[in-house]
Image (tube, grey):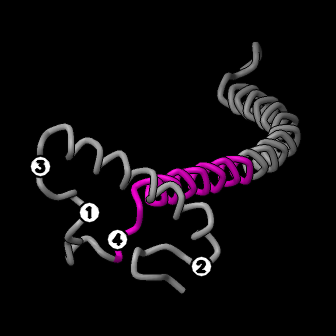
Amino acid sequence: MTDEHGTSEGSSGFVQPWIAQLRKITEELAGMTRLSESVFAQPVPSLQGLPLPGAVSAAQVSAIASALAAQRSSIAALQAQLAAFDEQLEALEGILAPLAEWSKKWAEFERLAMNARRSPGPDG
């Protein structure tokens, strides 16, 4: 649950002193520049409820870190799939290599057999 400053109840112990310090610094700067009122003296309604820049930044960094972890996980899965596919190709290559050699020998045998039929013997 958030209070009127947009902070959660659990983080108010940490955020409130920080906001008070920022308010004090701003008031001192306003006094040095001879401004009659502090910037925080009249709250801007449109800014209430907005998250603090640090919270937004932390959320963005967290989202980026999560996205990177997901991408790395995806890459690991792809590597596993590629390794399995490479093993399958290796097995297929092992099966096809002897078949290709046998096919080559068979084609050579057919060529020799056809040439033997066509060419007449020395008697013929």
- Which of discs 2 and 1 lies nearer the camera? The answer is 1
Crowding around mark 4 (Cα neighbors within 10 Å: few <14, some 14 to 19, many 20+) is: few
Characterize the magenta stretch by its predominant secondary structure.
helix
The amino acid beneath tag 4 is Leu
Residues tagged 1 and 4 counted as in contact (Cβ below 8 A) = no
The amino acid beneath tag 3 is Leu
Return the x and y of residue 109 as percentages of the image width and height.
80, 30
Which residue matches tag 2? 9
- N-terminal-most mark, 1 or 3: 3
Q: Is residue 70 magenta?
A: yes
Tell me the SS state at disc 3.
loop
Q: Is residue 117 magenta?
A: no
Depth order, front residue of 67/83: 67
Residue at figure coordinates x 21%, y 78% from the top left? 45
- N-terminal-most mark, 2 or 4: 2
Depth order, front residue of 81/26: 26
Location of residue 5 by image quarter: bottom left
Location of residue 116 by image quarter: top right
Depth order, front residue of 46/72: 46
- Which of discs 2 and 3 lies nearer the camera? The answer is 3
Which residue matches tag 1? 40
Magenta region: 49-78
Is residue 41 positioned above or below 74 on the image? below
Which residue matches tag 3? 35
Return the x and y of residue 9 as percentages of the image width and height.
59, 79
Return the x and y of residue 113 as percentages of the image width and height.
76, 32
Is residue 120 positioned above or below 114 on the image? above
Crowding around mark 2 (Cα neighbors within 10 Å: few <14, some 14 to 19, many 20+) is: few
- Which of discs 2 and 4 lies nearer the camera? The answer is 2
62 sits to left or right of 5: right
Residue 50's tag is 4
Crowding around mark 3 (Cα neighbors within 10 Å: few <14, some 14 to 19, many 20+) is: few
